[in-house]
Image: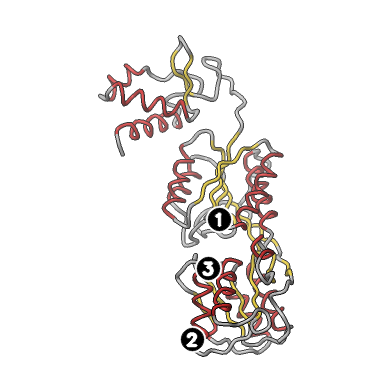
């Protein structure tokens, strides 16, 4: 990091720790130059950056003050609170619908959103949370995590400074904060039961990245097969360490190339199902006449595919709304108890991609 960036971090740390109280003046450029042994240019750039970000404000003829209070008066200025939202990608309409639900609730509580994408990178997720922990304008966070193995250092820091957070969709076991998701096991059970009701017995299950232990629909898939005394064939379960759409296409083509019989595919999500449909078309197989396809999510893509995709509705809009409600309860201190793990029931939406065997 360059000298300007290092100084910015130092000033933010001093603000957060109360060394520079809200509404009070920070040392002058000359004082900072003398104290830290930096050039006047470096100090000015750092202060300009923090003024631009709203963390400092210049008062003509008075100096530079920490934002958030009237200079010298000690009273808080009514500044709209900001919630950091971290989703894996902007390209998946599922997350777009989720953010719509978050945004609708945020308006009710006069909260503003700062939405970032992690691009399925734990490092990026960690960096966003670390920066948000140090940003006094950010009051809380909603995160779709990229790993369920353990919480990131950024999340630990975020909670350590006293800011509440809510996980969406899945959560690490070692982080004590609220979370909301659908019942993935029930969603899988509904999907597989639907296929069995249509007469299918050899049902392939396909899942790609991110692989999330404890939050995979494969357990529900196994539940229903066992309940119907159908054998669980390992060759029909394809969990690949590749992106979802790529996995869907590759897994189907692999099954066909290996001459493994199947009449239906249960895809982990709509993106995986998109790849499945592509692979089936390349192989000259029709959906649903030759192979039925079902997934979980019920995003805009499911309604727009050809044929329209039978999908278990995971209610992204409602999940987003509930996540914001849980966060606001913490912000308003209307709930201060143990972490809440809210689980919503899914429901099956039948369209044209599934048919009787």
102 horizontally vs 172: left or right:
right
10 horizontally vs 171: left or right:
left
Q: Position of residue 55 (x, y in %)?
A: 48, 28
SS state under label 3: helix
Residue denoted by label 1: 91
The residue that appears at 48% across and 66% down in the rendered structure is 243
CB contact under 8 Å: marks 3 and 2: no
Residue denoted by label 2: 257
Quick one: label 3 or label 1, which is nearer the N terminus? 1
98 horizontally vs 120: left or right:
right
SS state under label 1: loop
CB contact under 8 Å: marks 2 and 1: no
Front residue of 334/209: it is 209
Q: CA distance from mark 2 to mark 1?
A: 31 Å
Residue denoted by label 3: 245
From the image, which quarter does the C terminus lie in? bottom right
Q: Position of residue 102 (x, y in %)?
A: 65, 47
CB contact under 8 Å: marks 3 and 1: no
The residue that appears at 61% across and 51% down in the rendered structure is 338
Quick one: label 3 or label 2, which is nearer the N terminus? 3
Is the image coloured rainbow, by chain, by secondary structure, or in one colour? secondary structure
Residue positioned most to the top: 61
Q: Position of residue 22 (x, y in %)?
A: 50, 24
- Estimate how packed mark 3 is, as few (under 14), some (14 to 19) or many (20 or more) residues with alpha carbons within 10 Å: many
């Amino acid at each position: 990091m360059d000298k300007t960036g290092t100084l910015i971090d130092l000033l933010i740390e001093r603000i957060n720790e109360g060394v520079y109280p809200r509404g009070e003046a920070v040392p002058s450029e000359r004082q900072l130059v003398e104290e830290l042994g930096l050039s006047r240019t470096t100090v000015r750039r750092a202060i300009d950056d923090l003024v631009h970000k709203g963390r400092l404000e210049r008062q003509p003829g008075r100096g530079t003050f920490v934002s958030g209070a009237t200079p010298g008066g000690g009273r808080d200025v009514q500044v709209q609170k900001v919630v950091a939202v971290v989703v894996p990608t902007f390209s998946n309409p599922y997350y777009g619908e989720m953010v719509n639900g978050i945004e609708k609730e945020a308006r009710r509580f006069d909260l503003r959103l700062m939405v970032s994408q992690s691009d399925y990178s734990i490092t990026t997720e960690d960096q966003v949370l670390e920066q948000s922990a140090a940003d006094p304008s950010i009051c809380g966070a909603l995160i779709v995590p990229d790993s369920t193995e353990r919480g990131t250092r950024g999340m630990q820091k975020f909670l350590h400074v006293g800011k509440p957070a809510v996980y969406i969709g899945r959560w690490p076991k070692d982080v004590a904060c609220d979370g909301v998701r659908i019942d993935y096991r029930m969603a899988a059970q509904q999907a597989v039961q639907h296929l069995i009701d249509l007469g299918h017995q050899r049902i392939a299950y396909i899942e790609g990245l991110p692989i999330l232990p404890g939050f995979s629909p494969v357990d529900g898939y196994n539940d229903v097969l066992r309940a119907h005394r159908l054998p669980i064939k390992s060759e029909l379960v394809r969990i690949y360490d590749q992106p979802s759409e790529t996995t869907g296409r590759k897994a189907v083509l692999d099954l066909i190339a290996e001459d493994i019989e199947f009449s239906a595919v249960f895809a982990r999500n709509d993106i995986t199902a998109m790849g499945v449909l592509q692979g089936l078309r390349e192989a000259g197989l029709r959906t649903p006449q030759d192979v039925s396809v079902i997934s979980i999510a019920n995003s805009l893509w499911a309604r727009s595919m050809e044929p329209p995709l039978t999908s278990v509705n995971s209610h992204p809009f409602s999940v987003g709304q509930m996540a914001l409600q849980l966060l606001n309860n913490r912000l308003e201190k209307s709930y201060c108890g143990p972490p809440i793990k809210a689980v919503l029931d899914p429901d099956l939406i039948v369209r044209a991609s599934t048919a009787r065997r």
